[in-house]
Image (cartoon, rainbow, N blue to C red):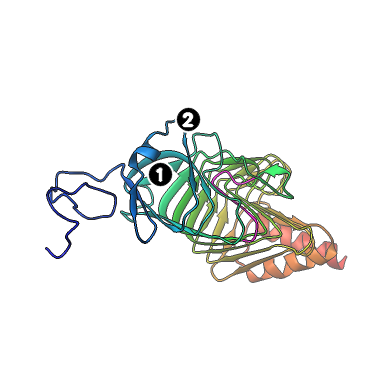
Amino acid sequence: DSDSDVNPGATEVCNGLDDDCDAGTSEDGFAAFDDGSTVTDYTSTLGAGTASTPADVTLSTDGTMSLCDGTYYVNFDVEADVDFAGVSGDETAVILDGAATGTVVAIETAGVAVSLSDLTIQDGDADVLAYFSSTESGGAIACVGASTVSAENVVLDSNSAEVGGAIGLEECAGTFTNVTVSNNSSDSSAGAIALTDASAEFYDSFIEGNSAGLYGGAFYVVYSATGSDLYFEDTEVTDNTASSGIDVGLIHNDSTVDCVGDTASSGLGFTGHGDAKLRRHLRVLQRRRVHGDGLRLRRRLRHLLVG
């Protein structure tokens, strides 16, 4: 054939090709990193992780981490522009498992761009300090500093943190498309998503079944200097819980939440600090499909503003 790297003597690597011309050779459990000039086999590096002791892997070179079907017990420290890609396209077949010992994808270097596609991140337990750099945040994905992170066709499930069980962003920008954020938990606030002077956009996504020990079963949006922005489009936020009763989210002054398109929520709404924020909430609620307890919350907010 036209590819000299594909031949009976070649070593099988995770690239979606039959490198050794043997259809019986499986790529399951294989991983490879391509920096644009060299492809490095990461199979043994990631395979060294176990359910009790995950592999600790630092990526400091720009490139693509290709992951074939399998479960990888690993915590990544990302210091460069890196794309994590599940090769099969099935987000349930490629699993990054943090073994409950740290954040699975940690970004603590400013100025980098990280993307994830077609994979699941589970069982991360945050060890990155965010939320004013004082609290462990983001069990699945943590980003601290002026960087960007994006995810498409990704599941974030059963991760935990003090604040932001699945996602913790501080001074970062995140874009999430066709993402399911489910069954994550926080000891304090934001069972799913915590933003501190950060922004996040969700498109065609589901945020469901997350829980917080105090506030914001789904999200907690806070600020110190610049404010935070959270945007939902065609996204469903359902069945999230918090002990305070603020099941959906808590938002501080100078931060915004926009809900557009076919976006819906269930549960006892969300609240904010200060009249300005309550007015902003009211406008948001009027733009979304509100039902159940959300309708009662809208009426209560109108009473607070007008009465």
Residue at the right extreme, as displayed: 307
Residue at the front extreme, as displayed: 37
At which x and y percent is residue 46?
39, 40
Query: In terms of secondary structure, what is the magenta stretch mainly?
Result: loop
Q: Is residue 138 magenta?
A: yes
- Label 2 or label 1, whichever lies nearer to me, is 2
Left or right: residue 2 versus residue 152 is left
Kind of residue sitting beneath label 2: Thr
Q: Is residue 77 magenta?
A: no
At which x and y percent is residue 47?
37, 36
Estimate the spatial distance between the alpha carbons at disc 2 and disc 1, rounded to whole Å.
16 Å
Work out whether residue 183 or residue 172 is closer to the camera in this orientation and state it.
172
At which x and y percent is residue 127?
61, 40
Left or right: residue 170 versus residue 26 is right
Mark 2: few/some/many CA within 10 Å (<14, 14-19, 20+) = some
Kind of residue sitting beneath label 1: Ile
| N-term mark: 2 or 1 | 2
Q: On residue 121, which mark appears?
A: none
Q: On residue 95, which mark appears?
A: 1
Quadrant of image for the C terminus: bottom right
Secondary structure at numbered mark 1: strand
Secondary structure at numbered mark 2: loop
Quadrant of image for the N terminus: bottom left
Tell how many labels: 2
**Residue at screen point 14% across, 44% down:** 24
**Residue at screen point 47% across, 55% down:** 61
Q: On residue 53, which mark appears?
A: 2
At which x and y percent is residue 9?
14, 47
Q: What residue span does the magenta drawing correspond to?
A: 137-146
212, above or below 251, in the image: above
15, above or below 135, in the image: below
Work out whether residue 94 or residue 302 is closer to the camera in this orientation and state it.
94
